[in-house]
Image (cartoon, grey):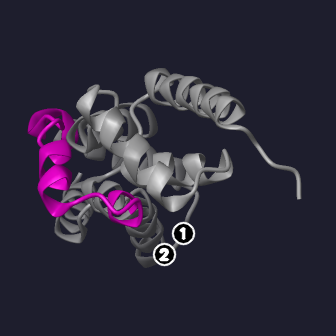
């Protein structure tokens, strides 16, 4: 069994520190992502926890900041609704507190406008659809898949029908 000297181990951990600092600096990360990355880099569990603690202290790892940036980005760029943002943040093991903070980044008026635009565009795309029921279902399904609340989707579809 090849034996590492403490000297080599020190260099290894410096490399890991550099790599993980770069990883966290590039974009906001959640704890689960960083934990996985540290294991990938060959850290033991105590090293992982120690590195996580250091990153939090250094302000490089902040779950609330991550949740805010994530919610903002997914809404602005991908036009996701709140439901999809919530479920994706939960998958990343983000606390409910931070999820709430993340959702607070979404402007309510902008949210309404985005939902309206997405639904209206989809509705217009389906103008060749003969069955009104089918058209409504397709718009509803599309908005659900984007992560919008079902009551908001239904309200919008009712407005589109009356147009």
Residue 111, percent from left and from top: 20, 41
Residue 26, percent from left and from top: 50, 22
Q: Which mark is residue 27?
A: none
Left or right: where 157 falls relative to 128 = left
Residue at 55 percent across and 64 percent down: it is 129
In the foreground, 2 or 30: 2
- Look at the image and tell me whether residue 61 can be seen: no
Instruction: Rate crowding at label 1 as few (under 14), some (14 to 19) or many (20 or more) other CA atoms within 10 Å.
Output: few
Q: Are marks 2 and 1 in contact (CB under 8 Å)?
A: yes
In the foreground, 62 or 7: 7
Q: Which residue is mark 2?
A: 134
Above or below for 155 versus 70: below
In the foreground, 61 or 143: 61
| Residue farthest toward the right in the current orientation of the protein | 1
In the foreground, 112 or 13: 13
Residue 121 figure quarter: top left
The magenta span reads 88-111
- Circle 1 — which element? loop
- Image quarter (top left, top right, bottom left or bottom right) of the N terminus: bottom right
Confirm whether the magenta stretch covers residue 34.
no
Q: Which residue is mark 1?
A: 130
Confirm whether the magenta stretch covers residue 101.
yes
Residue at 17 percent across and 62 percent down: it is 96
Residue at 66 percent across and 26 percent down: it is 11
Residue 79, percent from left and from top: 38, 41
Left or right: where 120 falls relative to 22 = left
């Amino acid at each position: 069994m090849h034996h590492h000297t403490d000297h080599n181990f020190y260099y290894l951990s410096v490399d890991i520190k550099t790599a993980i600092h770069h990883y966290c600096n590039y974009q906001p990360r959640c704890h689960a992502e960083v934990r996985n990355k540290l294991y990938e880099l060959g850290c033991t569990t105590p090293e992982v926890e120690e590195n996580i603690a250091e990153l939090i202290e250094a302000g490089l790892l902040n779950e609330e900041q991550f949740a805010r940036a994530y919610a903002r980005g997914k809404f602005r760029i991908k036009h996701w609704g709140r439901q999809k943002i919530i479920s994706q943040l939960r998958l990343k093991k983000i606390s409910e507190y931070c999820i709430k903070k993340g959702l607070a980044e979404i402007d309510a008026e902008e949210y309404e406008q985005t939902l309206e635009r997405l639904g209206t565009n989809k509705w217009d795309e389906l103008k060749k659809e003969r069955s009104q029921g089918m058209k409504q279902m397709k718009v509803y399904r599309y908005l659900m898949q984007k992560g919008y609340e079902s009551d908001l989707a239904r309200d919008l579809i009712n407005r589109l029908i009356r147009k």
